[in-house]
Amino acid sequence: MKCVVVVDSSCDLPQDYLQSNPILVLPLNFSIDGKKAVDTLSSVEKIKMYSRELLGRDHNVESIPSSPAQVYTFFMNHVVTQYDFALGQTVTQSRSPNYDNWQQASGQIQTDYHLKRHDAGLTTPFSFRVINSGTFFAGQGLLAAYTIERLKQGISKNQIRAVVEDFKQDINAFAVPRDVAYLRERARKKGDSSVGLLASMIGKTLDISPVIRGDSDSTETVAKIRGRDNAVNRLFDYTTRHMQEGLSFPVVCISIADEPATLTMFAGFDTLLEQAKAHGVKVLISVMGMAGGINLGPGSICISFASKHKDYDF
């Protein structure tokens, strides 16, 4: 049986990892100053977008979910005749209607795939399940990487959903924005109080940077740290500590809405890489997708790892 994991483009994973594993990316949409586009951008193109200040506070930018029709078309064209089983994973349902749109499309896909497979000379059925990842960006990348490893180990399609749902509980995903004022403006436009207007105002006036948690279907500020660079280093140190204590899955995912090479400016990043090597942990580094870049802002960093211990002690 040929299996595939299908993620939306909020999921942050390196391009070479995506190409070497059975993972397909169903693009979200975005608009900049009223001009709509589909997020099929390469890493190089995304870096250019972040560096050109097109996502700045002076521009009207928006991340837009895939419509049920887009989901249906993608699966019918790229999935139902190429694979026998697909496990879809969307950005957290609490932040986006994407999961609901995928669910809405799934019924029609299950109804219409038969003729498509028949015309392709396939006589076996096609199965499709959708999971709400409960997380965002690098957290989605971690969930997809875990799913791929379990599929490689030979887990059956009847078991994989329950196993992945259980693993979701261990996901720790955090983000640090570069510009808190950008984050405040995005929250204002979306009517979003999860970051907190007061915290954003403090950040603007006192150089306090929030650490935002995005897992377990919840988004909240779990720490307020003076100085953005200090906040990023504290997040790397926090991840390293959990790595030393033992992870549930030996992978750490990091994404940045910028050139990944800029991560080397953080001392905590170098320490994390050293400790990852010492503990046999793979670090997957990618350019943040447009959904993350738009919602968090250029220069933002997201990191995810799996641990049953969640203390938020930064």
Image (cartoon, helix red, strand yellow):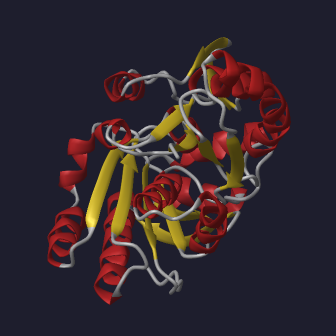
Q: Is 188 drawn above or below residue 251 in the view shown?
A: above
Q: Residue at x 32, y 68 (%)?
A: 236
What is the x, y in percent for residue 201?
A: 63, 56
Q: Give the position of the C terminus as an image quadrant.
A: bottom left
Q: Is 6 drawn above or below residue 306 in the view shown?
A: above
Q: Residue at x 37, y 77 (%)?
A: 238
User: Based on the displayed image, in which of its 4 quarters is residue 163 positioned?
Assistant: bottom right
Residue 220 visible at all: no
What is the x, y in percent for residue 60?
A: 65, 23
User: Based on the displayed image, in which of its 4 quarters is residue 164 positioned?
Assistant: bottom right
Residue sitting farthest toward the top: 35
User: Based on the displayed image, in which of its 4 quarters is residue 268 positioned?
Assistant: bottom left
Residue 42 visible at all: yes
Q: Residue at x 57, y 62 (%)?
A: 156
Q: Is 106 drawn above or below residue 279 in the view shown?
A: above
- 172 relative to 159 in the view: left or right: left
